Amino acid sequence: MSLRILYVFPEPFPLPKARGVQVAHTLHTLAQEGVQVTLAFVPPSDGALDPFSYYGLTRPANVELLPISRRLPWPLHTLPSHSNRWFVGRLTRWLKKARKQNRSPQLMMARHLKASHALLRQFPQLPLLFEVHEIFAENAPPSKQPRLQRMEATVLNHATGIIAISTGAAERVKARYGVQRDMPIVPSGAMLPESAPEKDWSQINQQIVYAGSLYEWKGAQDLIAAAEWLPGCTITLIGGDPHRITELTRDIPATGAAIQFTGHLPHRQVLEAIGHACIAILPNRPRSVSAFTSPLKLFEYLAAGCAVVVTDLPVFREVLENDDVRWTPPDNPRALAASIRELIEHPARAQALGACARQRAQDFTWQARARRLIRIMEEMVHVA
């Protein structure tokens, strides 16, 4: 008998952020591996009926969509106010009905703290697999930290299973909350194209990309500063909101590489752009979420066969060998420029590095992630 799971995502879906991509591909691949998936999500304001199509995916027949509103009940539903409490309350009613009809899921999976905490209280006998991507109490305003810390401690101690996106995330959780239980590491993944994307390595200096959000800890500003030492090059930054792009535009050096911002693009277009790129940059700074991230874009860079330049942080050393990428010290635009320039001056070496990256990506496909999750889920259901 195949597994029956409920995945809880109390946000609008599709979501134009990395977590939306990760959830869509994880559930799509779990379903391909035979898992019966019910996805509880907030329907988007545009009324799209199939969120998977946004990511260029065909929804498998064994994925049931369960759209649940966060808005106030009728006749107040048109007001702009919304709350996850309404989402959880409606999901609770659905679960109780499903239990009476003998079609309850065998387990729940979630990465959202408040929803996980509420579901644990309502359904303590239903196994919950909680996925650690961040420490919520550390990122909240001071006034909210005590409450979130209590919630986080409860979920980490009472969820049937816990997985972490990286060793850094697991160690941070264990240090803060004294968690002693097993916490498997299940990193993000990427879709590996059947054949390597075609790249024009003769134009390597024009095919340099960064893809992702433009938060300070992501280090995009260091890449922009590095442009000063890369004359004749073109660097394209994919992603980011208009306000942040405006801020960073002011920091573009007067001389050096040409900088292009695309703003947010649909995920399919992002993958196309990465596919054409020769050099891809991951310039994270050693603070905030960089301590425990498992960046989706890293695996997408590898899968696209890019020569990847990565800041030398422990969280990246978890998944990469010394020769997989070109390492560069963080917080150092001049060194970053030197690493990029070295690849430009030796395109054959860069092409070989890209081939190595694509080989390395085979360890981080969505299929590999799904099969790891299935083994964990089957053990949870067996124990329960």
Image (tube, grey):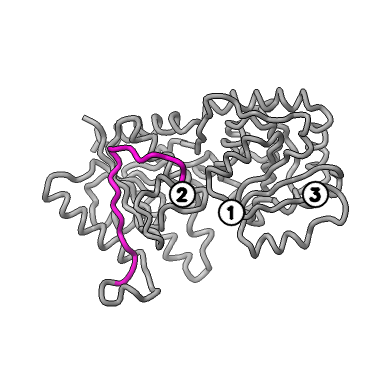
Relative to 44, is 321 on the left or the right?
A: right
Q: CA distance from mark 3 to mark 2?
A: 31 Å
- The amino acid pointed to by label 1 is His
Q: Residue at x 62, y 56 (%)?
A: 240
As drawn, the label of residue 20 is 2
The crowding category of the residue bearing disc 2, from other C-alpha atoms within 10 Å (few below 14, some 14 to 19, many at least 20), is some
- Disc on the earlier residue, 3 or 1: 3
- Say above or below: 241 vs 273: below
Q: Which residue is mark 1?
A: 264
Residue 151 visible to the viewer: no
The chief SS type of the magenta part is loop
Q: Residue at x 34, y 74 (%)?
A: 78
Residue 218 visible to the viewer: yes
Q: Which residue is mark 3?
A: 258
Start-end of magenta stretch: 55-72
- The amino acid pointed to by label 2 is Gly
- The amino acid pointed to by label 3 is Ala
Q: Secondary structure at mark 1?
A: loop
Q: CA distance from mark 2 to mark 1?
A: 14 Å
- Disc on the earlier residue, 3 or 2: 2
- Disc on the earlier residue, 2 or 1: 2
Q: Secondary structure at mark 2?
A: helix
Residue 15 location in percent, x, y?
46, 53
Relative to 73, is 13 on the left or the right?
A: right
Viewport quadrant of the C terminus: top left
- Say above or below: 33 vs 206: above
